[in-house]
Image (tube, grey):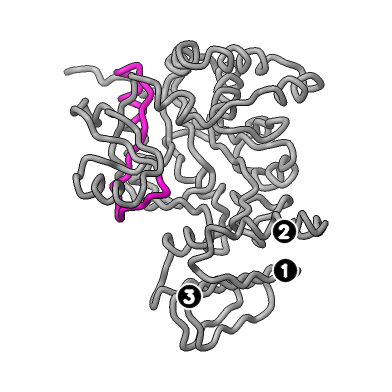
Amino acid sequence: MARRSAPVLASVLIIAGGRGTRFWPASREAKPKPLFSIDGKTSLLEDTIARHLPLIPRERIFVLAAAAHQAPFRRALRGLIPARNLIVEPEGRNTAVAIAYGAAVIRRRLGEGIIAAVAADHYITPAAGYRRTLADAIRLAKTRDAIVVIGVTPTRAESGYGYEKIGPKAEVGFKVEKFVEKPPPKLARAMVRSGKYLWNPSMFVMSTRTLAHEFAEHCPALGIAAERLARTPRPRLAREYHRLKFDSFDRVIMEKSQNVFGVPARFSWYDVGSWHGLWDAVGGDDGNVIRGNAIALDSERVLAHSDSRLMVLFGVRDLIVVDTGDAILVAHRERSPQVGQVTKELERRGLQRYL
């Protein structure tokens, strides 16, 4: 009888960056977006950790966050993963730096292996489908010595997302022919109609050796810096980290590499980047999304979220209303992606206590 191959040991790097200004007032400096709860029970970060279990053991799950958010993340991660598995960036940087530094720390800790780099603020269902997809990506990354991305079947022609073009079949996946970042609406519609493009949710799976090779070829300065910083004592780390000025991982590596494969997602994916993103993920009857102590009467396409006081929306439509106790947001649904402008105005007015 043929002997089954040993399972591939993999780790996951969950990138919990960004303040989530488009989720104001629920997302603040003291409570970053990954700690936001969609169902009022568990946070997006908790959900992200849970859907990797038991495929990835807790001891191999790492979270990377900026030093400014270290305290709330340490509290939130207590009992979920080992405390030392919180990797702290001296300051927030783009995903190329985050992945390079996080992978270098994991490699130094665990040795060579496969790493999945994912975001902490995506809404994915079902978790079992995600684990099957991730297992496919891990196997393909090992057999092809390549970076593997996950591709999501588009449900609409979304011009705000990145896309990956499906190339020749390769085992459980396919060769990625090219990436298209945020195409204009007309092009997005043509791409979706062709059936040859998938959404790119920026989920990357690769061995530490493959990643090192890609950095050496396309961005050697960052690859060398990350390996050095993984060994740098804390007092010097902040000063050297501040000098790292690089773009996203998609632009620095993915769009240049010729060694990228993909696997199709066996799950539904939502980028919960704004209140409108939450709407898309969990929209209920009549298009209303009601969270917390809120009621919607004779109202359509409203999102109501109240942490404490009773909120009643009566006879309105296309509104987002969020009450966190010390701040209230009332916005038109179509303006949801621009809510980040509110935090800029609060900064201008010196109202730091609301940030």
**Within the magenta stretch, is there residue 139?**
yes
Q: What element does badge 3 sit on?
A: loop
Residue at image point 67% right, 62% down: 25
The percent position of residue 349, horizontal first and vertical second, equals 80, 59
Q: Judge depth for marks 1 and 3 and give the one in front.
A: 3
The percent position of residue 278, horizontal first and vertical second, equals 48, 61
Question: Which quadrant of the view contains residue 322?
Answer: bottom right
Instruction: State the residue in front, 285 or 77.
Output: 285
Q: Judge depth for marks 3 and 2 and give the one in front.
A: 2
Q: CA distance from mark 3 to mark 2?
A: 23 Å
The percent position of residue 240, horizontal first and vertical second, equals 73, 20
As drawn, the label of residue 250 is: none
Closer to the N terminus: mark 1 or mark 2?
1
Give yes or no for contact between labels 1 and 3 (Cβ–Cβ under 8 Å): no
As drawn, the label of residue 345 is: 2
The percent position of residue 241, horizontal first and vertical second, equals 70, 23
The N terminus sits in image quarter: top left
Residue at image point 19% right, 28% down: 169
Q: Which residue is mark 1?
A: 327
Q: Residues within 10 Å of mark 1 (few under 14, many from 20)?
A: few
Question: Which quadrant of the view contains residue 82?
Answer: top right
Q: What element does badge 1 sit on?
A: loop
Magenta segment: 137-161
As drawn, the label of residue 318 is: 3
Instruction: State the residue in front, 231 or 82.
Output: 231
**Within the magenta stretch, is there residue 144?**
yes
Callout 2 amino acid: Glu
